[in-house]
Image (spheres, helix red, strand yellow):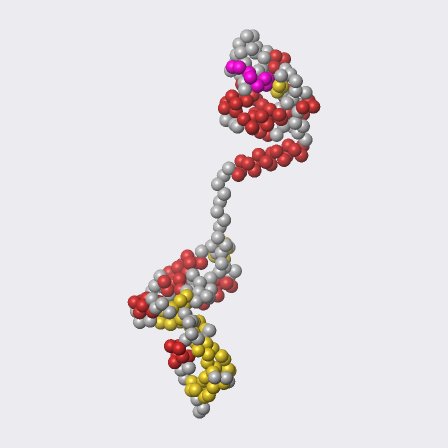
Amino acid sequence: MPNSDGYRVKDWKQHQHYTNRRPPWVKLHRSLLDDPDYHSLPAESAKILPLLWLIAAEDPDLNGGLPPVRVMAFRLHLSEQAITKHLSMLCHFVEHDASMTLADCTEILPRDRDRDRDRDREETEGEAAPRPPRPRFVPPTPEQVREYMDGRGERIDADAFVDYYASKGWRVGHQPMKDWQAAARGWYRRDRERNPEQPPPKPRPVGLYWVRDGKTVWREFATEADRAAFLADPDVEEAPESSQDHPTYRYRITEAWPLIIIRDGIEERVEVREEEIPETVAGLVLTGSRDGIPVYSEASK
């Protein structure tokens, strides 16, 4: 095979002397055990060296010649860049046109060898697909537990569930809890086993969370159709405090009416839509006005 790149193994005839033949093996001398140049090599380069000896045994001139870099790359299943790097590391064992001296070698100090080994390890580990990070466990609130179980048509004491596992540090046995929904389903099954005569859970109420007078309340509807029709009102919008676990709605404020409300001696100024005024002042009477703003308070007994 033509040796266009001019690489060959050093002292080939001294160590690998054959009688005009191409053996399927090479000789490995015990002196390698005490060779500091070999022991200073990076692990990958040390592994490549005996493979290069095997390739050199195929030289028809029996002179330890190596084929072009691209051929060595193909034979060893490496890139040409990697082969060139290893050849520079192996300059104590491989020469180039008899012109490479020890001064031309890439000197491998112990700290460099450790760095190369760490880099090789990182490159190998980097080939594996990274594992997606496990979602961080967030303890639920009683409202989240209640909403989740109601959605399944199963009722548990959500406050007792949260209090119990909070007292345990959200651990199941000796292991941290990973899935509170699964724990809640198990809690329900154990409740049913302990109380087989327990009546079936009531159907989940049809309603939504509604913002009124700056406070969030639960608003129920007779049927799901009534709830859907209410949400179809173009004046109904999702409130800023709404979340995926706690959807909340309000009337879209187009024209607000200021009112002064006095309950239990506490005065509060609110702004509501005209259609919300009757509900807001229920149980109160108009007692006057202040700066043109109606004042509602509890009737005198």
Q: What residue appears at the point 42 percent right and 82 percent down from the top-left corner?
A: 281
Relative horizontal placement of residue 201, taking residue 96 as reference (left or right): left
The image quadrant of residue 224 is: bottom left
Residue 76 vs 246, above or below: the answer is: above
- Given the current orientation, which residue lies at the most extreme bottom position? 301
Q: Is residue 206 visible?
A: no
The image quadrant of residue 26 is: top right
51 or 72, nearer to the observer: 72
Residue 258 vs 36, above or below: the answer is: below
180 or 5, nearer to the observer: 5
Query: Residue 190: x, y in percent?
Result: 39, 61
Q: What residue appears at the point 38 percent right and 77 percent down from the top-left corner?
A: 275
Query: Residue 271: x, y in percent?
Result: 46, 76
Relative horizontal placement of residue 84, taking residue 240 as reference (left or right): right
Q: What residue appears at the point 61 percent right and 33 percent down from the top-left corner?
A: 116
**Extent of the magenta region:** 1-8
Residue 141 vs 264, above or below: the answer is: above
Magenta-drawn stretch contains 91: no
- Given the current orientation, which residue lies at the most extreme right position? 103
Query: Residue 123: x, y in percent?
Result: 55, 36
Residue 124 vs 244, above or below: the answer is: above
Quadrant occupied by the C terminus: bottom left
Q: Is residue 216 visible?
A: yes
